Image (tube, rainbow, N blue to C red):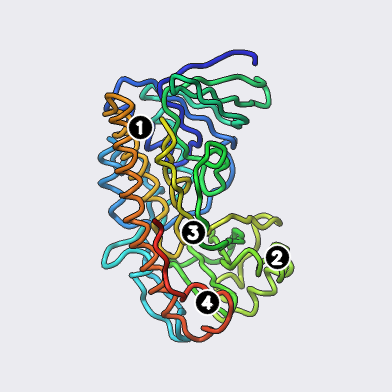
Amino acid sequence: MIHAHECDVLVVGAGPAGASTALNLLNHTKLSVTLVESSDLQRLRVGESVSESIFPILDYLRLPKSHFGTGCFTPTQGNSAFWGSDKSANRHAIFAPDRATFQVNREVFDLTLLETVLNRGGTVFPRTKHKAVTQLQDGRYVVEVNHPEHGKFAITCNYLVDASGRNSSLSKSLGASVTQHDRLTGVGAFYKSDSTSFEQIQLIESDEYGWWYSAALSDQMVVVTYFSDFESISKMKLNRQSQWQQHLKHSKYMSKRVERAHFIDDNLWIRPAGTHFNQFSHIKNYLPVGDAACAFDPISSMGLGFAMTSGCQVATIIGNATSPANFNENSHIYQQDLARQFEEYLGFKQHFYHKEQRWSDAPFWAKRQQHVHQVA
């Protein structure tokens, strides 16, 4: 190890969940906070739909909407869903019942959160991957990390927050039990139009093997994603551009949206989008947030709001920890609260997928319409 770094709280992952944890700690405590992020923060991010309930969360973090600039939150003009029928329906329930929705520029949003973390005294190490974690007898953690230029070094912390997302290896290495409910996977691409403007709507279209989703990220750019089980994507070779585009051509409505547009990048992006739940409360001085705690099907549009609120909740637990017993008690309460939210989500998920009966015998739809089992 070249050198050691010490802090009160180490957050692994600098997305909205990790940044919200850090901001809440920096706003309300005197604890030192460090974030490590494996990416270089420069990749093109997939936009996300949120309801107006995101703004009270930002206000709580002392980040008013105006702080993000004029182009970060674009009002959605409508939602069209071809789900359960060949007729278009305005399905606000997919995204946010009876509330206005916005398309978020995730690049601006994420970087604004991190800039604020730095401005308020936090430390951020980008392009830094965690390699190994050891817990000392006094409860502290020593996390070995690696940076491509600065090499390996160790970070010692009193509390460890896992904001590393759906593929968190950190929680499993510490002994957490993750229950995987499905292996939904998204394969997508960004399209650009040089001649026409994309309508600011979100479009969903289901088929026998899964469902398509698209949203305008700007007047000239749209993201198109196909969601199906990992096994189906592999079998149908939908991770290949030619096969993915051929499948898109078979869609009745999605293909029309991009018929005058072109790929921005020749490569498709592939991301896990499955449902899982993390049992972690037996691990001392460790708390997961966002997708590392529990991950939701993107049809629920719970991702960003949940990421930030769970980060705020965990920061409050750490900030109010007066003893190991106090921390453990609040960790159990947090676990129970997550379980309650997750049960409600599973019911919603089953209810929504049950609305599509045209391919109810197809493996993708059949497994999502089965009876929901409790988490714990």
Q: Label 1 neighbourhood size at 10 Å, few (<14), some (14-19), many (20+)?
A: many
Q: Residue at x 48, y 16 (%)?
A: 6
In this picture, residue 229 sits left or right of residue 340: right
Alpha carbon distance from label 1 to label 2: 40 Å
The residue pinned by badge 4 equals: 365
Residue 72, numbered circle: none
Mark 2 belongs to which amino acid?
A: Ser
Question: Helix, strand, or loop for circle 3?
Answer: loop
The residue pinned by badge 2 equals: 234
Q: Earlier in the sequence, mark 1 or mark 3?
A: 1
Alpha carbon distance from label 1 to label 4: 40 Å
Q: Residue at x 67, y 21 (%)?
A: 151
Q: Earlier in the sequence, mark 1 or mark 2?
A: 1
- Residue 188 position, x and y percent, is 60, 61
Quadrant of image for the C terminus: bottom left
Mark 3 belongs to which amino acid?
A: Thr
Mark 1 belongs to which amino acid?
A: Leu
Q: Label 4 neighbourhood size at 10 Å, few (<14), some (14-19), many (20+)?
A: many
Question: Helix, strand, or loop for circle 2?
Answer: helix
Q: Earlier in the sequence, mark 4 or mark 2?
A: 2
The residue pinned by badge 3 equals: 275
Mark 4 belongs to which amino acid?
A: Trp
Question: Helix, strand, or loop for circle 4?
Answer: helix
Q: Earlier in the sequence, mark 1 or mark 4?
A: 1
The residue pinned by badge 1 equals: 23
Q: Evaluate if marks 1 and 2 touch, with contact meaning CB atoms under 8 Å apart.
A: no
- Residue 26 position, x and y percent, is 33, 26
Q: Residue at x 47, y 47 (%)?
A: 106
